[in-house]
């Protein structure tokens, strides 16, 4: 989780301008909680997805199930940034919103539709009409709304920050859709803060302008062997390259241990909106071409590919190493949620050097095997497919005919009841990190004497602190002096917990459940395109990150309860207990929506106990 010192900001930046930068960095931080990372969709990208699914339905009619699923997602009242709740759609394209809300999904989800594609053709045509409108005006409307905000007027801070947060989430999704990388967005803003630039909305929009620029790229090859020769020849097919030695590079070049002056490097020029995105794309293209050429026993050029890539702007004298930290296309950068969860558990002995003991349960043996294979695969398609296999393998029971419906049912319930624990842990971690980074700046809030947050007593102390709303506005001001994002997230969580009713929690869990289920459906579609059609995917980062987190957490909980805690449980039993807990909690909340959260100790205690999925 990234945080910064409060004195690192440019002296003239307003609180809202600081929030703008903090929120973008948070959404683009691979170390953030899964609930706080950027989302896959906005109204514009979801419309594009619907148009594509209509086209796929003409080729393979069973795709209409995915089309129906996305239509339901698009009009849900619980899914943020969908067509129904996209702020830009709601303000400028109400005809599209009304069409999606009122469309009868049953018309394309029946036997009749399978035999007669007339209805899907009609839907496709209407969606393409809306697509033309959004292609012309969506981006300009978004920029208009972002620049219309008065970043100097602090009279209604939480209302303004709420609107700005919604716009930021839409903006990030659009940037990613159009070719920017998470790594670049994060790295650029953090560099600006370090250099004490004044970061305004106009600076961000001007820099990330979707216009290609000319860059020079270097790839360190090292010594020439058979694999690297094939690699060089592939690059020559599409680019004019220059082969040099490191000692012949005249510009400033970052070096590291493996780099020697005699090492061979390839130099070429290319035009792109984002150099890191270009390098990611080249990795994917070159890997596929090299493997298609013939079977490979090793893939030497790809082992340290991202460490060995450098770029510079035209006429610049300094090369910069590629920034791909946390991006799942890079094998060393991939998260390992299973191991991370084991390491964070203070009740067991497990560290970075530990190995997972061979499980007695044959289901866990197979599932962890596929999971670890997935993390080591250089092909992102293969990795995604193996992760899905791991998930299907560990599935404790199937109550539907199709695997995907069973997976959605179990994971939707099991992981959504952890939403409150995730929000709680993320907020407390941000408070602690900022307090440490800024020399105990929150000493007036009486939190420094709390026990370690990993202990039950420590968690109870923090929870009771959040429940105490006697001084909530003063706390907000104290937190905002250090971080606008922290103050916003504190008020966004503490106020409904301390003053709100169970309906708020019910909505949060429903939102999480629907989001997980629709994301699983989206992943399943891409996985099937890989396995059944041999298709290759482009936007994989967010899908992979979510799937890896789902599988890692399910494996961790299964391993913990069946192998490490001596509870003599079965995988089937532990997930049936989770499902029963979900049903009890949601039933209680539905019957007691008007009851205050702070008066519902049994429910809140149960929700916060799901901290196994909080990180």
Image (cartoon, rainbow, N blue to C red):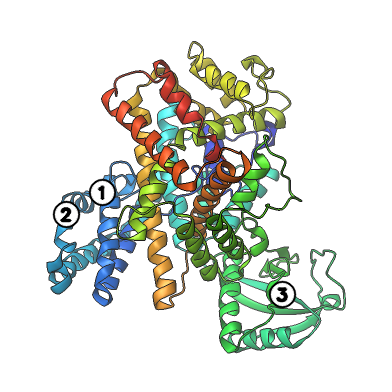
Q: Is residue 113 above or below residue 493?
A: below
Asked if the residue under mark 3 is in contact with the one under mark 1, i.e. CB atoms within 8 Å, the reply is no
In this rendering, position of residue 195 left or right of residue 208:
right
Residue ID at (38%, 30%): 505
Q: Quadrant of residue 47?
A: bottom left
Mark 1 or 3: in front is 1
Residue 268 visible at all: yes
Numbered disc 2: secondary structure = loop
Residue ID at (83%, 70%): 259
Quadrant location of the C terminus in the rendered image = top right
Asked if the residue under mark 2 is in contact with the one under mark 1, i.e. CB atoms within 8 Å, the reply is yes
Numbered disc 3: secondary structure = strand
Return the residue at label 2: 103
Q: Residues within 10 Å of mark 2 (few under 14, many from 20)?
A: few
**Label 2 to label 3: alpha-carbon separation:** 51 Å
Quadrant location of the N terminus in the rendered image = top right
Residue ID at (36%, 60%): 403
In this rendering, position of residue 267 left or right of residue 222:
left
Residue 140 visible at all: no
**Label 1 to label 2: alpha-carbon separation:** 9 Å
The mark nearer the N terminus, 2 or 3, is 2
Numbered disc 1: secondary structure = loop
Percent x, y for residue 522? 38, 59
The mark nearer the N terminus, 1 or 2, is 1
**Label 1 to label 3: alpha-carbon separation:** 46 Å
Return the residue at label 3: 219
In this rendering, position of residue 202 left or right of residue 353:
left
User: In the image shown, does 395 or 257 lie closer to the viewer?
Assistant: 395
Return the residue at label 1: 75
Mark 2 or 3: in front is 2
């Amino acid at each position: 989780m990234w945080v910064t010192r409060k004195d690192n900001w440019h002296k003239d930046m307003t609180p809202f301008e600081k929030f703008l930068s903090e929120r973008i960095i948070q959404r683009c931080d691979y170390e953030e909680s899964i609930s706080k990372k950027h989302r896959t969709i906005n109204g514009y990208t979801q419309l594009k997805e619907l148009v594509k699914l209509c086209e796929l339905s003409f080729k393979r009619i069973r795709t209409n199930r995915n089309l129906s699923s996305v239509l339901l997602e698009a009009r849900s009242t619980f899914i943020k940034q969908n067509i129904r709740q996209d702020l830009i759609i709601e303000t400028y394209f109400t005809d599209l919103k009304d069409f999606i809300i009122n469309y009868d999904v049953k018309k394309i989800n029946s036997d009749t539709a399978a035999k007669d594609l007339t209805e899907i053709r009609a839907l496709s045509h209407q969606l393409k009409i809306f697509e033309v409108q959004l292609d012309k005006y969506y981006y300009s409307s978004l920029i208009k709304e972002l620049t219309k905000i008065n970043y100097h007027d602090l009279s209604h801070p939480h209302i303004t920050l709420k609107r700005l947060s919604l716009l930021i989430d839409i903006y990030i999704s659009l940037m990613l859709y159009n070719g920017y990388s998470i790594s670049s967005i994060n790295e650029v803003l953090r560099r600006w803060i370090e250099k004490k630039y004044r970061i305004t909305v106009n600076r961000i929009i001007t820099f990330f302008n979707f216009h290609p620029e000319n860059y020079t790229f270097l790839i360190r090859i090292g010594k020439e062997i058979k694999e690297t020769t094939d690699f060089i020849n592939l690059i020559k097919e599409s680019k004019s390259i220059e082969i040099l030695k490191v000692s012949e590079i005249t510009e400033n070049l970052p070096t590291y241990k493996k780099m020697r002056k005699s090492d061979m490097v390839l130099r070429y020029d290319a035009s792109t909106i984002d150099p890191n995105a270009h390098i990611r794309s080249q990795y994917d293209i070159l890997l596929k071409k090299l493997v298609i050429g013939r079977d490979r026993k090793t893939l030497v050029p790809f082992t340290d590919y991202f460490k060995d890539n450098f770029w510079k702007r035209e006429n610049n004298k300094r090369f910069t190493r590629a920034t791909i930290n946390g991006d799942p296309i890079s094998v060393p950068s991939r998260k390992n949620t299973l191991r991370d969860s084991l390491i964070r558990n203070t009740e067991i002995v497990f560290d970075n050097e530990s190995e997972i003991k061979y499980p007695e349960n044959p289901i866990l043996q197979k599932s962890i095997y596929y999971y670890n294979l997935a993390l080591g695969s250089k092909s992102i398609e293969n990795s995604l497919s193996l992760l899905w296999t791991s998930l299907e393998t560990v599935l404790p029971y199937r109550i539907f005919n199709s695997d995907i419906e069973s997976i959605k049912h179990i994971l939707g319930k099991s992981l959504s009841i952890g939403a409150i624990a995730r929000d709680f842990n993320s907020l407390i971690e941000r408070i602690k990190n900022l307090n440490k980074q800024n020399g105990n700046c929150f000493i007036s809030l009486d939190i420094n004497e709390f026990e370690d947050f990993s202990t039950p007593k420590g968690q109870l102390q923090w929870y009771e602190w959040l429940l105490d709303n006697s001084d909530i506005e003063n706390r907000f001001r104290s937190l905002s002096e250090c971080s606008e994002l922290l103050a916003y997230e504190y008020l966004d969580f503490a106020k409904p917990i301390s003053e709100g009713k169970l309906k708020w929690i019910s909505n949060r869990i429903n939102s999480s459940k629907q989001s997980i289920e629709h994301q699983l459906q989206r992943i399943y579609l891409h996985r099937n395109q890989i396995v059944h059609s041999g298709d290759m995917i482009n936007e994989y980062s967010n899908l992979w990150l979510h799937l890896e987190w789902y599988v890692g957490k399910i494996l961790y909980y299964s391993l913990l309860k069946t192998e490490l805690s001596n509870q003599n449980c079965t995988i089937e039993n532990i997930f049936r207990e989770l499902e029963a807990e979900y049903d009890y909690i949601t039933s209680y909340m539905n019957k007691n929506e008007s009851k205050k959260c702070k008066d519902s100790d049994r429910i809140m205690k149960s929700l916060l106990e799901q901290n196994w999925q909080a990180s």
